[in-house]
Amino acid sequence: MKRARLLLLAVLPLTAAALWFAVPGFPGADEAAGSPGREATRRAEGPGLAAPDKKELAQELVASAENSTLNWRGAYGYIEDIGDGQGYTAGLIGFCTGTHDLLSLVERYTRDHPGNGLARYLPALRRVDGTDSHAGLDPGFPAAWREEAKVAAFREAQDAERDRVYFDPAVHRAELDGLGTLGQFIYYDAMVMHGPGNGPDGFYGLRRRALAEADTPAEGGSETAWLDIFLDVRRAAMKRERAHHDTSRIDTAQRTFLDDGNLGLGTPLEWKVYGETYRVAR
């Protein structure tokens, strides 16, 4: 029997002063057990996280956890090896040289813009794909990435790849599961961090684990209880990863929104990540 754990629904005061692809045909991308149901259909009719103001908020929330800032547009030129076994992490969504998404981004960008400053690194990017190696990338690749990030077309390419691989699949899956704006964001953030993979700690693996314990709203379950279980499963996965042992993006952000009953991710919003307080007032 699936666990049906209920949250305390009383509105609590905020205490703070406050890689892999999910494209059509990829295993797991279209996981949908049966019909999405009436609730999922109703959710899909609304703008949800895809509404311009909510999508902007989603990028700010992710940037607070990924880059310790609300200025997500300032992350296009970011590049660093954070020691998580995935090589260089770069750009506004943390594309990685070891998880194929950075390679796919540069390949697509180069098809549209031959001769760009990153094209010469494609052979090396293909060789290190799936590893944490920097072979053929050092010492010039980080500087080349930062320089190319000054080009508007490359920033647009990062936006497009973020939407294709992470944002659109996450929102679509959440709509099928009958989730509102907060649930769509919770899926999106999980997709960004864990990748849209089918493995045990990929997004679809985490979702399957949650399905063993609770029903989605589309299956007739409680939206709050489902998100509670999903966050529990995701938090446990983060604790198993050396680079992601800090779970404040869940504990003092997403869990706070859920405990407050803010399923529409309404603003003003206040949260903490890594002990730092962030606010969005609009």
Image (cartoon, rainbow, N blue to C red):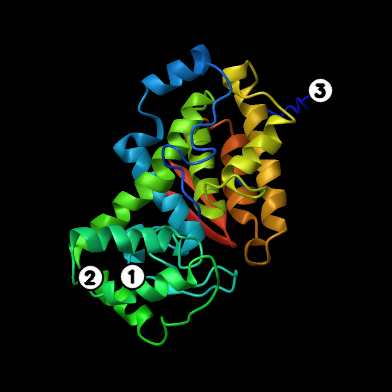
Mark 3 lies on residue: 1
Q: Residue at x 70, y 38 (%)?
A: 209
Q: Residue at x 54, y 31 (%)?
A: 31
Element marked by disc 1? loop
State which quarter of the image contains the N terminus. top right
Q: CA distance from mark 2 to mark 1?
A: 8 Å
Asked which secondary structure carries label 2, the reply is loop
Residue at far right of view:
1
The label number, if any, that marks residue 150 in the structure image: 2
Q: Earlier in the sequence, mark 3 or mark 1?
A: 3
User: Horizontal and vertical percent for residue 128?
Assistant: 48, 72
Which one is nearer the viewer's eye here, 68 or 88? 88
CA separation, marks 3 and 1? 48 Å
Give the mark, 3 or 2, whose residue is nearer the N terminus. Answer: 3
Of tags 3 and 1, the one toward the viewer is 3
Instruction: Determine whether label 2 and label 1 are within 8 Å by CB.
Output: yes
Q: Which residue is mark 1?
A: 77
x 53%, y 34%: residue: 183
Q: Quadrant of residue 198?
A: top right
Label 2 is placed on what type of residue?
Lys
